[in-house]
Amino acid sequence: MNEITMKMQADQLIRMALQEDITSEDVSTNAVMPTATKGTVDLIAKEDGVVAGLDIYARVFTILDEKTEIDFHCKDGDEVKKGDLMATVTGDIRVLLSGERVALNYLQRMSGIATYTRQVAKLLEGSNVTLLDTRKTTPNCRVFEKYAVRVGGGCNHRYNLSDGVLLKDNHIGAAAGSVTKAVQMAKAYAPFVRKIEIEVETLDQVKEAVEAGADIIMLDNMTPEVMKQAVELIDGRAQTECSGNITKENIQKIREIGVDFVSSGALTHSAPILDISMKNLHAV
């Protein structure tokens, strides 16, 4: 994550997370440590996985106290093993205690997404399929979660509703009335630099989408057999994406179908956290 993104989005969101956890004061810490005391604590991996979010982890502490120092022994994208020392954090013990939970929440969540994404991406190695995420992210955590997908080896689909045209079943049925009409309306409204993607569920809709001039056709919840027929029908006249309950357990069925992209909400909504802990806190 570059410095501009950090300043524009991450800082504000991290401050909101800290304010959620500390509405007025950290009563527990202030009760046992009334004055500043310099200390150090170790960041330790408790299971194997891929690291993501170290800058966010560090920023939690430097927002609380800019004098906090973090000495990292790994970087985002690295694979760590259970027991590895990932970092040493030095600063006011009160800051280390007060920021611990928020910092770990970000790091564990982001590393969990990166770990799961890496596992899924490896199942597609050697194919021509690009792995994408979705907008199925935790509210106010999208910037972090989509970053973690990239660290894990996936790619980002549109960031938000302003980022591109994707016409789904409700757009087609309730608003436009047909695939053809939906594509025509989108082409008339959206800037010419925007690609038009449309979600289809049947081979008849596939034919309609191709004839209407859609740039990307999303094959939603189709069986592998029907999906293969759809790809043959499209025959390179549009890019293809498949979606619908794609997980680590079933993604290999997509490898040889011939789609260009596969999108998986599971990358962000179903990835377990990576267990990481802060241990050995002591005064120095």
Image (spheres, rainbow, N blue to C red):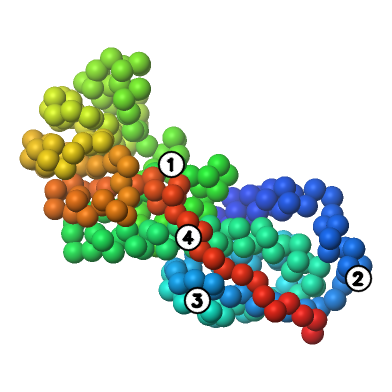
| C-alpha gap between disc 3 and disc 2 | 35 Å
Disc 2 is placed on an element classified as loop
In the picture of the structure, the residue carrying the numbered disc 2 is: 35
Residue appearing at x 72%, y 47% in the figure? 20
**Which of the marked residues, 4 or 2, is nearer the chain's N terminus?**
2
Check residue 82 in the rendering and tell me which mark sits there, or answer none: 3
In the picture of the structure, the residue carrying the numbered disc 4 is: 112
Q: Where is residue 110 in the image (x, y as percent from the top left)?
A: 51, 59
Marks 4, 1: nearer the viewer:
4
Q: Position of residue 225 (x, y in %)?
A: 12, 40
Check residue 135 in the rendering and tell me which mark sits there, or answer none: 1
- The answer to whether 156 appears left or right of 280 in the picture is left
The kind of residue on which mark 3 rests is Lys
Q: Mark 2 Cα within 10 Å, few/some/many (few <14, many 20+)?
A: few
Check residue 283 in the rendering and tell me which mark sits there, or answer none: none
Residue lying at the far bottom of the rendered structure: 284
